Image (cartoon, grey):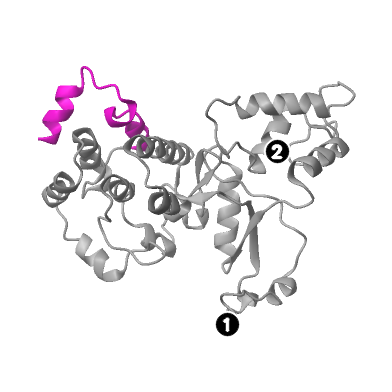
């Protein structure tokens, strides 16, 4: 509330909507439903008891009690590095929560409080080493779970690629590189996919952090798996590439990658998109903005149809 309240100490409609987005309140299914903004405006009007187009903190608290109950399900991320935690908070603060999962205000705590915690599934972890905390709204599923358990259709995959590309384009427009893009770091909130885990992110032109090595493969690798059902490069349980496979990837050529794409991805427009993303020279790869305009995602295959097919050949 305090973050989005105006100088009068109240929320206007835009501030109320921003609070709902931050709290992760989105419809589980948008089909045949009014937009979130329309619903929130109706709720704002109901809770604005004195009809002054402003919601007081007391009114907002009553709204939250009725909407969320006494408790809101959240995720706590404990971090070892002060620098990584500061980077995560700083980078998120400048980004739109339509693309990046926002942070919630942390509870009052100190390092001694965290040191007393014990993780049920990891009892030997010394929590005193993880004294930094960020709080996020709990998401529905990761892209990894969606891929494995829901078996999305090609149309659904196209929609997911659009959302991830739009989120990356938003990051890049703020001159930020994610640094660890993988399916586990893409979460679904309602019907929207959002990026998380920005502790490996860096400003364009800055020195990359140590964690970047786990996400060194281009976003096209994730797209390849979504379209083919198989990993381009094997990863471990955390979807990090091990050193031996990084060495193997270093031997790739564009020709070898094109052969792999042709053998495992049947759609010719998808082949063309992957060939523009999976290039050995990173400076030659298609940007996120160009991905969004590609015929495979737009479905607009008129005058560019022959050109795309010639590029696939």
Residue carrying label 1: 124
Q: Per the image, is 292 magenta?
A: yes
Q: Is residue 10 left or right of residue 249?
A: right
Residue density around tag 1, few if under 14, some if 14–19, many if 20 or more, within 10 Å: few
Q: Position of residue 185 (x, y in %)?
A: 46, 53
Q: Main secondary structure of the magenta part?
A: helix
Q: Is residue 225 left or right of residue 116?
A: left
Nearest to the observer: residue 10 or residue 211: 10
Q: Secondary structure at mark 1?
A: loop
Q: How many marks?
A: 2
Nearest to the observer: residue 210 or residue 233: 233
- Quadrant, the N terminus: top right
Place residue 160 in its image quadrant. top left
Nearest to the observer: residue 39 or residue 206: 39
* Residue ID at (80%, 37%): 63
Q: Residue furthest right?
A: 50
* Residue ID at (35%, 36%): 158
* Residue ID at (36%, 31%): 292
Q: Position of residue 192 (x, y in %)?
A: 51, 39
Q: Position of residue 89 (x, y in %)?
A: 60, 52
Position of 54 relative to 213 (above/below): above
Nearest to the observer: residue 229 or residue 209: 229
Tell me which numbered mark, 1 or 2, is placed earlier along the sequence. Answer: 2
Place residue 119 in its image quadrant. bottom right
Residue carrying label 2: 19
Q: CA distance from mark 1 to mark 2?
A: 38 Å
Q: Which residues are magenta?
A: 287-313
Q: Is residue 150 visible?
A: yes
Q: Position of residue 219 (x, y in %)?
A: 34, 48
Q: Secondary structure at mark 2?
A: helix
* Residue ID at (85%, 35%): 59
Q: Which dot marks residue 87?
A: none
């Amino acid at each position: 509330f305090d973050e989005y309240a105006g100088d009068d100490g109240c929320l206007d409609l835009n501030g109320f909507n921003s609070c709902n987005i931050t709290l992760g309140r989105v419809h589980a299914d948008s089909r045949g439903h009014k937009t979130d903004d329309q619903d929130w405006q109706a709720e704002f009007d109901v809770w604005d008891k004195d009809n002054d187009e402003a919601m007081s903190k007391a009114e907002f608290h009553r709204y939250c009690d009725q909407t969320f109950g006494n408790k809101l399900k959240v995720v706590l991320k404990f971090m070892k590095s002060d620098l990584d935690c500061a980077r995560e908070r700083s980078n998120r603060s400048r980004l739109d929560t339509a693309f990046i999962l926002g942070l919630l205000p942390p509870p009052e705590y100190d390092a001694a409080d965290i040191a007393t915690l014990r993780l049920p599934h990891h009892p030997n972890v010394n929590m005193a080493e993880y004294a930094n905390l960020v709080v996020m709204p709990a998401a529905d599923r990761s892209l990894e779970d969606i891929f494995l358990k829901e078996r999305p259709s090609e149309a659904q995959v196209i929609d997911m690629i659009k959302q991830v590309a739009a989120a990356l384009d938003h990051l890049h427009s703020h001159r930020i590189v994610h640094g660890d893009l993988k399916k586990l770091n893409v979460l679904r909130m309602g019907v929207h996919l959002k990026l998380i885990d920005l502790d490996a992110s860096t400003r364009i032109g800055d020195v990359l952090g140590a964690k970047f090595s786990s996400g060194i493969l281009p976003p096209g690798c994730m797209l390849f798996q979504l379209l083919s059902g198989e990993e381009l490069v094997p990863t471990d349980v955390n979807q990090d590439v091990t050193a031996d496979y990084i060495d193997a990837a270093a031997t790739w050529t564009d020709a070898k990658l094109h052969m792999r794409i042709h053998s495992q991805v049947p759609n010719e427009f998808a082949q063309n998109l992957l060939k523009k993303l999976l290039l050995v020279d990173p400076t030659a790869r298609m940007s996120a903005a160009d991905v969004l305009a590609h015929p495979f995602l737009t479905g607009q295959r008129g005058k560019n149809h022959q050109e795309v097919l010639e590029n696939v050949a």
